[in-house]
Image (tube, rainbow, N blue to C red):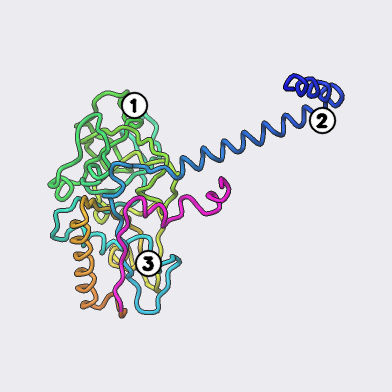
Amino acid sequence: MFLHYIDLSIRSIKSTPVISVLMVFAIAIGIGLTMTSLSVFHMMSMDPIPHKSQAIHFPQLNIMDEGGEWHTDDNIPYQLTYQDAINLYNADADFPRSPSFRSGFSVHLNTPDVKPTMEPARLVYQEFFSIFERPFIFGAPWSKEEQQSKPYVVVISESINNRLFNGQNSVGKSIYLDNKSYRIVGVVEDWDHHIKYYDLNNGAFNSPEKLYVPFSIAPLEEIGTWGNTNGWKHETLNGYQSLLQSELVWVQFWVQLNTAAEKEAFSALIMAYMEDQQSKGRFNRDNLQYALRNVTQWLKYNQVVSEDNRILVG
């Protein structure tokens, strides 16, 4: 019977060769598109840091006065204000945590031999590297003392180190970011992630930054953000310092909470902080509101994998 069907197929192809070829191509294209969609969906829905995704958390604060609205399902801004990020970082707690935001610099050696290139950078505190387990090829993160009193230090990526120093150990050498000299303290491997989960606000599938400088350098050099800045009320900004004191949200923040007890303790810290700020005239609302989501929850909250994609692959 099987041979009979084979014979019929051959006869059919010979009698209608053009249509048969078109049908084969159509089936092949359909299978190819289906496999591509499944592969993309698998990549988008993959846990980016499976051994730690339940421990790393992103806090959100509802900073708006009563009646204020935000374009999220729970009415809470995606990011933090600078003042809230700094205050939560400086709070009396032992949990590893770091604010961060995306920026960029013209990178050069202040010599005519190497052309400057504009490179994306991330401003972070030293804990960022341990939270996200960034592997160092040379050197190490800057120290607590350096990020507070000697912040003109930088961690560069492997690709920049290869371009500027031919892959050699560049720790202790200097590079220029715009017109300032920064001492290299470490070189990290290029970050090969499929989802930029630590900064979804600026693009879930964008390339990672190639430079890391201390967050504390921002007010000293008045470094602007390359990310999104949003607000909920009218404010007149008179320079960079007024931006730092404003209610505009533009800073991301991550904290590592390894146990349910640690998450409960940090939640209590957030609530105590919001109550303190409310007593000073902020958060003028009846019910104080915040959120504390781990990486998996954060990806879902930001709809990295949309319902349309889920329906598409069935």
- What distance separates the C-alpha of mark 3 from that of mark 2? 57 Å
Q: Find numbered disc 3 in the image and state the secondary structure of the residue it sits on.
A: loop
Judge from the rendering whether residue 210 lies leftward or rightward of residue 143; answer left or right.
Answer: right
The amino acid beneath tag 2 is: Ile
Sequence order check: which comes first, mark 1 or mark 3?
A: 3
Residue at which label 3 appears: 76
Query: Residue 262 at what x, y percent from top left?
Result: 19, 56
**Which stretch appears magenta?**
287-314
- What distance separates the C-alpha of mark 1 from that of mark 2? 54 Å
Instruction: Tell me which residue sits at (67%, 31%) in the image.
Output: 28
Was residue 77 drawn as part of the magenta stretch in this picture?
no
Q: Residue furthest right?
A: 15
Label drawn at residue 13: none
Q: Find numbered disc 2 in the image and state the secondary structure of the residue it sits on.
A: helix
Q: Do the residues labelled 1 and 2 touch (CB within 8 Å)?
A: no
The amino acid beneath tag 3 is: Ile
Query: Residue 59 at what x, y percent from top left?
Result: 29, 59
